[in-house]
Structure formats: structure tokens, C-alpha cells
Amino acid sequence: MLAFVWEAGVFTATEAMSAIGLTRSTTIDVLDELVDLGLVRELPNARASGDYQKGRPARRFELRAEAALVVGVDAGRSHLTTAIADLRGTELVRKHTVLPDGDDSVDKRRAAIRAAVDAALDATGRGRADVLAICVGVPAPVDRSGKSPTHPRDDFWRRMNPDLAELFSAWVPLVRVENDASLAAVAEGSVGAAVGYDDYVALLAGERLGAGVVVDGALLRGAHGGVGEMVAFDRVIGVEGAWGLGHRAAEWAREAIDAAEVSPDSPLARIDPADLDGRTVLLAAQNGDPDAGRIAERVSAMLAIVTGILGSLFDPRLVVVSGAVSAGAAEVIARAREALAGELDLPAPELVASTLGGDVVCIGALAAALDLARSGVLDRVDSLREAG
């Protein structure tokens, strides 16, 4: 019944009975219970609303979307994006925070993420007691329990995910921590380019490469959350690392400028190399600059190799280039698409740009938090009652 309510908008008891297949008396009993639990409200009946014509007026109901909040957080290394929505998924606020360089210690990172969530809640006029579910995306592998493994060199992964599941479980009933690329895949499958697909990869490709992988409709994670980790590309000729399209475009542009291989008339030559980023390079290529175009060709070749390997490993129907870099990657993606057939024996996946922009991870986190709320709300309804 609650699954029906979540999708139905305003409905009558008769419509609920027909959709679910219960008897009228059972339907009314269940709806009354959901009203008592605070998840559904009864509206004025059809006579009171002016829709009544004859016979007994129909009882009308709807989900109490404001009964609780869900929170999605993209906890990147240098930024935080926090979004809050009601139980319908209607977004109420989205806030961006830039983190200071040079200090990603566990205590400061935990404090910064907690403060970002509290600030977003303040902007809605609500408080911690109103939150039913939260999902946080981090640039690290995350296992089923929300923990990240120890990184073999500098423990970067555990600094990025400093026991965030434990941090928020102290006051949020339902908590999920997830790899950022996996949440990009959730976003693409929920509202993005992968809607309707059961087999696809979301490739976060800005500064570093990361992949969220969905096979047979299920998000893959692995024993330690490592599905989609890209360290193997250190050993792949033509890629040589897990650096993203944006990073490589900027790096190769700087190398070309240092080697005097860029014309003084190129827009690349008029930018301080320290300020040059991948999106600028790719947009210059898209606008016809020949020097940027040569760099874009190298990036395209790299993308074709990466996509071909992902295609061979996971056999997706679709690979979506996600994140902020996707806005300027149309030409790169088109060239990579042409070269893709030669990179694998299986049918090549479609290769497309995301339309969700730089907030794709936050969008996925919010969608995951909403799914978590929908699946777990009846087990946590006492928390809603206590919140009032």
C-alpha cells in the first residue's frame, strides 16, 4: 500500500483498492493505519472538495511528503555538495561548500561534512530530528557496511570515508555510504541518460577515473567496494593511469605550451598554464581550435581504450561520461565512439555524455537516500512519531 501511495499523488480508497487488489475493508484498515503512523493524510472527501456527484462521497488521501526529510551528500576531496528533499523527492535546498586545501584529516573532515548537513537543514527550517535517511558519496571504495578499506600507501580512502556511517547513525535512522562513481550510476539510472537500461556504466572522468557499474539491474560493489576502481589502467598502454579526461586534457595542453607546440593565436596560449583546466581545453577543441583539437584527439583515443576495456569486462549496453567534464566532451565522445568498435570483440556499448552536470554524485546520493527511506520507513516509523 505504501508503495502505491508513494507514486499515486492524491487518490481515493477505491483507486487504492483497485490498484492493490485488497478488499475495501482491508484497504480502509491499512490506510487508516498509515494515517495513524503519520505517513498518509486524509483529505476532505469528494463532497467537500466539490467533486461529489452522487452516492457515498469518496475518501481521499495522499502521502505526507513533509513527514520527514532525506539528505544526499557528495563528499569530494575538495568540495561538499549537500541536497535535502521531502519524501516525494522534491528538492528543498542544495548547498555547495569548498573545502580548504591541505587538511583532510579525519577529525576536520568529519566536522566539515557534519557542518554542511546542519547548514543545509538550517536552510530548510528543519532540524536533525526530521531526517529519515541520508546517503553520502565519497571518492573511495565502500563495502556493504559503509566502510572503506585501508589504502596501501597513505590511507587516503579512510580519510575520505572517516567512518561516516557511524557518524550519521548516531542521529539518522537510515544511513548509506557509497562510492561516488556508484552514486553517479544511481543518478544516471534514476533521472539521467541510463533511464530504462539494466546494463550500463557511469564513468566519472574529470580529475580521476571512476566507474559505477550496473549489471542486470543491480549496482555492483564487490567484497571491499572495489568494483570500478581504476588502478589497473596504470598498466594499460594509451591510458597509463587512472587520471580523468579533464586532468589529461589540461596536462597535455601544458606540455604542448611548454614545448612551443601551441600557436600564439590559440586560446590555450592566452591562459595562465596554472589556471588551465580540462573543460577549457575540450571546449576550445569543440569551438574549432586546432591545437586544442590535437589534444582532444589524444583524449578521445584514451576514452576509447577505457570504454573498450569496461565493455569487455562488464558487457554494458551504455557507457555514460558523467561529471562536470561531460559538458565540453561532446566532440571527444563522438571521436571515441567511432574508434570503439576496434577496441573489443563484443558489440560496442553506446557512449554518451551525461546531462546531469557536476552535481551528478549529489543527485545520485539524494536518489539513493529516497530509496532507502522508501524501503525502510515502516521499520523506523517510531522515529517519525518522536519527531512529531
Image (spheres, helix red, strand yellow):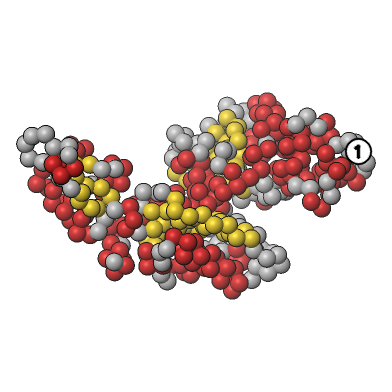
Q: Looking at the picture, how far across and down is residue 257, in whole percent?
A: 88, 43
Q: Looking at the picture, how far across and down is residue 54, in whole percent?
A: 8, 34
Classify 84 as above or below 188. Answer: below
Residue 338 located left or right of residue 162 = right
Considering the numbered disc 1 on the image, is that residue within a helix, a strand or a loop? loop
- The reply to whether residue 15 is visible in this rendering is yes
| Residue under the point 15% across and 44% down | 48
| Residue under the point 38% across and 53% down | 86
Q: Looking at the picture, how far across and down is residue 31, in whole percent?
A: 18, 50
Residue 278 located left or right of residue 158 = right
- The reply to whether residue 242 is visible in this rendering is no
Kind of residue at disc 1: Pro
Most foreground residue, 234 or 101:
101
Quarter of the C terminus within the rendering: bottom left
Classify 29 as above or below 52. Answer: below
Q: Looking at the picture, how far across and down is residue 316, in whole percent?
A: 54, 35
| Residue under the point 37% across and 61% down | 132
User: Where is residue 357, by image quadrant?
Assistant: top right
Which residue, as the protein is rendered here, is positioned at the far left? 55
Label 1 neighbourhood size at 10 Å, few (<14), some (14-19), many (20+)?
few
Q: Mark 1 points at which residue?
A: 264
Classify 378 as above or below 284. Answer: below
| Residue under the point 64% across and 40% down | 326
Which residue, as the protein is rendered here, is positioned at the far bottom? 107
Number of marks drawn: 1
